[in-house]
Amino acid sequence: MRRLIRALFPPRGEHGVITALVAVLAGTGVLLGMAALVIDIGALYAEREQLQSGADAASWKVAQACAATADNNLVSASCTVALQKNNAQQYADKNAKDLHSDMQLCIYTVSATGTTTLDPGCPGAWNTPITCPALPVSSGPFKYVEVRTTTKNADNSTVVPPLFGSGIAGTPYTGAKMGACGRVAWGVPAVTDTFALGISKCDFLRITGNYTKYFAPPLLGALNPLLQGTGVYSLLGLSSPTTDYIAISNGILSTSCATNPAETVSGWAWLGQPNGSTALLGLVAVNSPNATCGLTNIPATNGSADSWVGGFTISLSNASAATACINRLNALVASGQPVLVPIFDRGVALLNLLPSFYRVIGFAPFVVTGYETLGSGLGSLLTGLFTSLPSVVTGVQKTLCALQSCIYGYFTKTLITSHIPTQFATSPNFGAMMIGRTG
């Protein structure tokens, strides 16, 4: 009986309504228009993503090349629009699906006072439908590159062609031109984290030959023990790292810098973490370095704003810090990898003994190849007496060095990445360059 009732009086529902609605929308062209709109908008988004990837890759590559070749005044002979244009174009094209894009670039120099100058090869007008975001407020001299990419097809047309939109009734859609911007800045870091080992500018200039002699790790650094006797360093115009030693900074034993007598301190010193309280002569007191013998957020002297960091003496009273620093030294010697160290140019001494405070003016990547402590050089001297004259010379050198606790090593170059850098130092480039995206 129930089956008969259901057959005569079926329950009401919405069966067939969706089919009817689809038929109405398709018949009036609405469904087709919506599909065309979605597909064409998707094509525009895909184009913009490719252009943005190209602008980002091109701007970063140019900035990286310019920063890596900059001298102590941020000047690089290869960092011009004319010489970097092909480099940027290749990276812009490689990020486009069809390997084509319209690329323009400009390189800017910003002085310490904020004056901006453009490279002579910069475009007179940007051929782009977009504008770049405002440049973050930055202090200190720095440089930046700006790359703008726009749509360019294999047939040299400059719009993303419609896939379905041209078939929609009414005003035909003929495509749209897309664009993107990439910008990267670089300069000397004003504040950064470092190893607690400070080195004098005087020794930096001596070892680097006045900013001209750097090693290139990690290859040479990692293979250093194997390359010492091969002569490869002399072939490259570089001296062996073991000939470059730095005696501990001492008010009596240290000598003034030959190139600048005003820089009255040389050598190296352990530095402490500033704790913010005032101490002698208004200088900042220090705490011990951290568990890895590191210092955090150390500023460099910037313009007239001096940055003094107190010396830190390793002793039995701070055994944990002493262990941390010696362990870090041993790890650095074993790895051959560079570590960032503060560079100082002046010291304030107590009673003409060990300087208590050092004026930090910048940062440099340093590769530690060894160190001598009191008495360790005597064994080298005695061994040399029974071998050869060069060993005697080395032994004497190490013995004299051990009386002051010497650090052996060499300087290299490195790039420090930063997210939207807004502060650069006025000090020279000691091999450490900060680089980051600003747009």
Image (cartoon, rainbow, N blue to C red):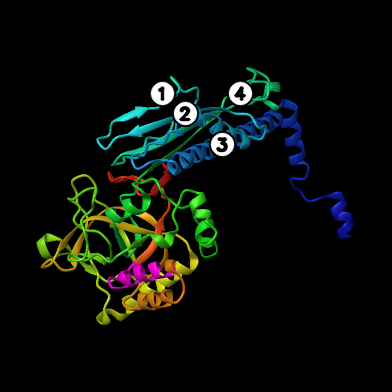
Q: Nearer the viewer, mark 1 or mark 4?
A: 1
Residue 88 is situated, as x and y percent measured from the top left of the image, at: 54, 33
The Cα atoms of the two marked residues, 4 and 3, are separated by 17 Å
- Specify the segment rendered in magenta: 391-406
| Secondary element at tag 2 | helix
Q: Which residue is mark 3?
A: 54
Q: Please name the amino acid that badge 2 sits on.
A: Val
Say the numbered circle drawn on residue 120: 1
Q: Residue at x 22, y 67 (%)?
A: 286
Q: Please name the amino acid that badge 3 sits on.
A: Gly
Q: Quadrant of the C terminus?
A: top left
Q: Which residue is mark 2?
A: 81
Q: Residues within 10 Å of mark 4 (few under 14, many from 20)?
A: some
Q: Residue at x 34, y 43 (%)?
A: 72
N-term mark: 1 or 2: 2
Say the numbered circle drawn on residue 159: 4
Quarter holding residue 137: top left
Taking the image as shown, residue 234 lies to the left or right of residue 372, namely: right
Q: Is residue 302 at all visible to an observer of this figure?
A: yes
